[in-house]
Image (tube, rainbow, N blue to C red):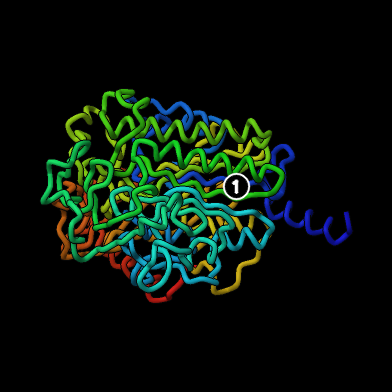
Amino acid sequence: MERRDFLKTIGAAAAAFGAAGAQAAAPAQPNIVLIYADDAGYGDIGCYGATSVKTPNLDKLAGAGLRFTHAHATSATCTPSRYSMVTGEYAWRKKGTGVLPGNANLIVKPGRVTIASMLKQQGYTTGVVGKWHLGLGEGDVNWNKEITPGPREIGFDYSFIIPATGDRVPCVFVENQRVANLDPKDPITVSYTDPIPGEPNGKDNPELLTKLKPSHGHDQAIVNGVSRIGYMKGGKAALWTDENIADVLTGKATSFIDRNKAKRFFLYFATHDIHVPRMPNPRFVGKTSMGARGDAIAELDWSVGEVLACLARNGLDKNTLVMFSSDNGPVVDDGYKDQAAEKLGSHKPAGPLRGGKYSNFDGGTRVPFLVRWPGRVKADTISNALVSQVDLLSTFAALTGGKLPAEAGPDSLNVLPALLGDSKTARETLVEHSGTLGLVEGDWKVIEPSARERLQRNTNSETGAAPKPQLYNLTDDIGEKNNLADKYPERVAKMMATLEKIRAAGRSR
């Protein structure tokens, strides 16, 4: 090894190990696998208290590493959380980062520093498998040729993705920016405005809904006996079968690991489970007492187990940092009659938290967050450090010796000591987002006033919106039941001023 390479390696190792908590020797630049579930709540997993569904693989992951109790997605819905995680910027700073339709254009500007492009610069082979929902292409997207810009233009060497969500058209996989298995003689047409003449839809043709019926919305294009959001025509050979989505995505994720086992790699594996429509493979049906939603959690756990087994099979356990989290909190009825509400029983998807998906209460953004790195992260440990997924860009840069330009990751902080279990503290403040904003600072949380509804009618979700500010002590009142704003008006004013300062500054790094 040349001297400059040796010094580079030593420098990267020092950055990774920090100061105090280094345990046994481990690689300075580990492989990184980020498993990102969809709509998995704080209480949906065994290691966070779930008993109605068994999650042995996730529980094993937690037992072999670090479990966070105060980790957050940045937003209470999917697109903004994914945008924030990939770019290191709070999504509420940028217009157009709300929940996207299936034909939206790419919302991450090509050339911008992302977790993928930064790791690629550090010598990593990068891949994304699963739900994307950050838009594709520019202008009127043509699904019948290469779609650009896409994952490649923001740093991913390989991609196999669901363009948006399982309940939105087009219901096809896109591999390396081309629709997989597309027959050119059967081109795809997609519309989010007008029905496509001659194509049945859920609203007018309910007799064709043979597998699942909508509870609200979701009554447009029919694919695999299920109606969706948006209209599409063609591409019949490319259409997915919902019951096989987990198998297909998990297979692509493990294949990526197999192909790149001799390299440093970063895999962003974004599962479809447990998002609607919940149609797990028949081998998972009936595995829980909770119906489709519980069975989809069991399927998610299987996917995690397959990835962990693949790493073990390839001898990659010790030099791979594995992380698991979710894009937002839980929702029970999110548009389909799958008996998720009727069969919930004693299960509490958000655990002790109030709210869930779409909510400014902590159930909207406080999510499961697990970290395993054998020999570096101490097994079976718990951390209550305040961390956010927006921090992954800066944290991965610190881990691998990368240098971020000043303008990159404007809200991404380096929380590597907390991520590795070397520090019990991380962020001092955190902004939560669900239409309106909330600020967490120490034990306290303030939610700014809003004219929006407190209850989202379709999903029966508490939004956390109210016409006056709300103040909660999260240490004494994790369920945010006791609004202390009237009791501590000075604290409210101070925290609201801090929130406004963060908003006005355009960055917090």
Q: Residue at x 50, y 61 (%)?
A: 151
Residue 164 image point, x, y percent: 36, 55
In this view of the protein, can residue 73 be seen by the observer?
no
From this view, report whether residue 262 is shown above or below residue 135: above
Q: Which residue is mark 1?
A: 32
- Evaluate whether residue 439 shows in this view: yes
Seen as rendered, the residue at the extreme right is 2
- Nearest to the observer: residue 256 or residue 292: 256
Q: Position of residue 382 (x, y in %)?
A: 50, 37
Query: Label 1 neighbourhood size at 10 Å, few (<14), some (14-19), many (20+)?
Result: many
Residue at image point 18% right, 57% down: 198
**What is the secondary structure assignment of the residue under circle 1?**
strand
Q: Residue at x 69, y 38 (%)?
A: 23
Extreme-front residue of the structure = 185
Apparent side of residue 331 relative to residue 383 in the rendered image (left or right): left
Q: Is residue 332 left or right of residue 106?
A: left
Work out whether residue 158 or residue 224 is closer to the camera in this orientation and state it. 224
The residue at 35%/40% (across/down) is 241
**Foreground residue, 466 or 291?**
291
Does residue 448 appear to the left or right of 368 in the view shown? left
Give the vertical position of 85 relative to 213 (above or below). below
The mark total stands at 1
Disc 1 marks a residue whose amino acid type is Ile
User: Dividing the picture into quarters, in which one does residue 184 lie?
Assistant: bottom left
Residue 428 screen position, x and y as percent: 46, 58
